Structures are given as C-alpha cells and as structure tokens.
Image (cartoon, rainbow, N blue to C red):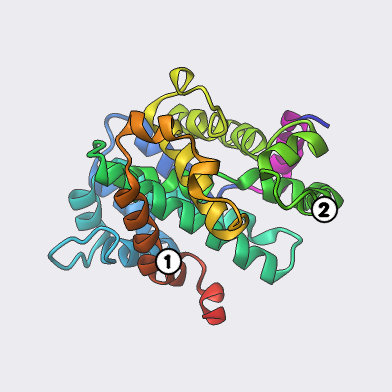
C-alpha cells in the first residue's frame, strides 16, 4: 500500500466533527464575522472549554483574562483560533483508534514536545505569528496513527529497527514512505490549508533550499524531540546538521533553552489536550 492508499482508508475511519467542518466553511467565507465563528464553537462545550483553557495558558501569556470565545477570537485572531480548533478536532478524530492507552499517551506527548519546540524556535527567531507553528508539531506525525490503525504489525517492525537508525529512515525501509508523507495525505484529504500540509509533507527534506521556513523549523524541532526521547546516545548535532542550524540562526544557547521550555510547558499543555496522559507524572 502507498501513503495515499493508507490515507484514503484512514479517511473513512477518522472523521472530523460537524463543528470543525462548519467552522472551516466560515473561515473560508470572507463575509463571516467573529460572532459567526464564535457561535459555532460555543455550541460544542468541550471544544469551547479547550480553546479557553489554551488561550489562558502560559503558552500565549496573554496578560488579561480571556473568558469568552468572542474575546479569544478577537485577541488571538481568527487564524490562531482556527489552528486550536484543528489541534482539538484532530485529537478527537483519532479517539476511535484501536490502540493501547499507554501508546497513545506517549504519541501525544511526543507531538506536544515537537509543538512546543517549534513554537519556541519560531518565537526566538521572530517568525511572524510564531504561535501558529504549534499546530504543525501537533499534526506532524499523524501518519503513525494511520499505520497503527491499519497495519499495526508495521508499527512493530518500525519500532524494532536498529536503535541507532533514524526513525524516518526505518519507515522508508518498512513502508516505502514516511509517517510524514502519509499524514500529509490525510490532511490533504481533510482539505486543511496547504500551509499546514506542505511543511508536514517536507519535514524530512534535508535540502533546505527546497523547503520553506516552516518546514525547516519542523525539521529541527522533530529531530531535537527524537534525540531527547529515542536516541540519547547521539548528540543533537548528529541529528541536525550545523549548517542547518546556522542558516536559521539557531545556536547552542537557543537549543538548550528550547528543551528547557518544552520541559516546563509540557505538563500544562498535555493537561488540556490529553488529560489522561498527565496521570503518568
């Protein structure tokens, strides 16, 4: 099976909610107002609660209290709220997956780590609206869940590869494609913005001249997360070429601060997006 075939099968299993579809329609409609979008979010109490918790978390560090969805949309902006809706809706869509809770907790923790790292790099490098990068980290590895649902034995093969080998290289050997490529196909099927699909598809591209800044930052964040969680025997610079870091302006101090930021914020974000995982701490 190809990445597209896996994504097509997954599209029949993992479906975005009616609330998400309606919000997407409103986002795409230039005549829609903040109140129109807020009204749809409010109808879904779990979605509304999650957005308010994230909006008031240290992740955004807004000085005042955001106590209504309308204020969240006004303060954070329609695009940022839409990204939060995407993160929440994706998490909900995969609730039906046939997988062990321990596995899922670890998966979402890795996703949150990658999201926090890319957000930190974006802010540190003064990328415009860097908070929007967070959703790239959350979505970056959805292909793994797709393969887990459809061919769980392939996940075991990928996990049993040489511990010193990079995971995406093992995925190519076992599947013929990477989790990144598979996840991008599902996001495309869901008709999510190209600005999300493209960096996720290209997150393993080593030639930075071929990819945009978002994909470059995701490349680095993913590798730092991988080194921290899976391949501690290797240094960060063995996973990320020095030239890539230099081209973006990332130095040793920023790398260390990014890891510290991730360690500091992980629990608060997990408690909102995946409360069950917090019990392991």
* Residue 84 point in image, percent of width and height: 39, 52
Q: Mark 1 = which residue?
A: 266
Queried whether the magenta region covers residue 138, the answer comes back as no
Label 2 Cα crowd, 10 Å radius (few <14 / some 14-19 / many 20+): some
Q: Which residue is mark 2?
A: 152
Q: Is residue 153 left or right of residue 132?
A: right
Q: 169 or 253, which is in the foreground? A: 253
State the residue lying farthest toward the top: 209
**Secondary structure beneath label 1:** helix
Q: Is residue 9 magenta?
A: yes
Q: Main secondary structure of the magenta part?
A: helix
- Quarter of the N terminus within the rendering: top right
Q: Work out whether 147 lies above or below 64.
A: above
Magenta extent: 3-15
Q: Is residue 96 visible?
A: yes
- Figure quadrant of residue 6: top right
Residue 41 falls in image quadrant: bottom left
């Amino acid at each position: 099976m190809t990445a597209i075939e896996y994504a097509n099968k997954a599209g029949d299993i993992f479906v975005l909610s009616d609330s998400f579809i309606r919000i997407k329609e409103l986002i795409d409609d230039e005549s829609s107002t903040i109140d129109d979008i807020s009204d749809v979010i409010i109808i879904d109490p779990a979605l509304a609660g999650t957005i308010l918790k994230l909006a008031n978390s240290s992740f955004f560090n807004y000085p005042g209290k955001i106590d209504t969805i309308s204020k969240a949309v006004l303060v954070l902006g329609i695009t940022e709220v839409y990204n939060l809706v995407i993160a929440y809706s994706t998490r909900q869509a995969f609730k039906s997956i046939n997988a062990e809770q321990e596995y899922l907790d670890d998966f979402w923790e890795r996703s949150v780590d990658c999201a926090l790292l890319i957000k930190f790099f974006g802010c540190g490098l003064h990328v415009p609206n860097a908070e929007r990068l967070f959703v790239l980290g959350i979505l970056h590895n959805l292909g793994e869940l797709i393969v887990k649902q459809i061919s769980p034995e392939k996940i075991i093969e990928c996990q049993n590869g040489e511990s010193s080998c990079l995971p995406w290289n093992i995925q190519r050997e076992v599947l013929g494609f990477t989790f990144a490529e598979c996840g991008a196909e599902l996001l495309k099927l869901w008709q999510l913005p190209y600005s999300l699909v493209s960096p996720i598809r290209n997150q393993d591209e080593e030639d930075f001249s071929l990819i945009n800044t978002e994909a470059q930052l995701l490349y680095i964040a993913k590798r730092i997360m991988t080194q921290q969680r899976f391949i501690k025997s290797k240094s960060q610079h063995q996973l990320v070429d020095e030239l890539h870091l230099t081209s973006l302006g990332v130095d040793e101090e920023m790398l260390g601060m990014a890891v510290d930021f991730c360690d500091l914020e992980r629990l608060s974000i997990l408690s909102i997006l995946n409360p069950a995982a917090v019990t392991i701490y």
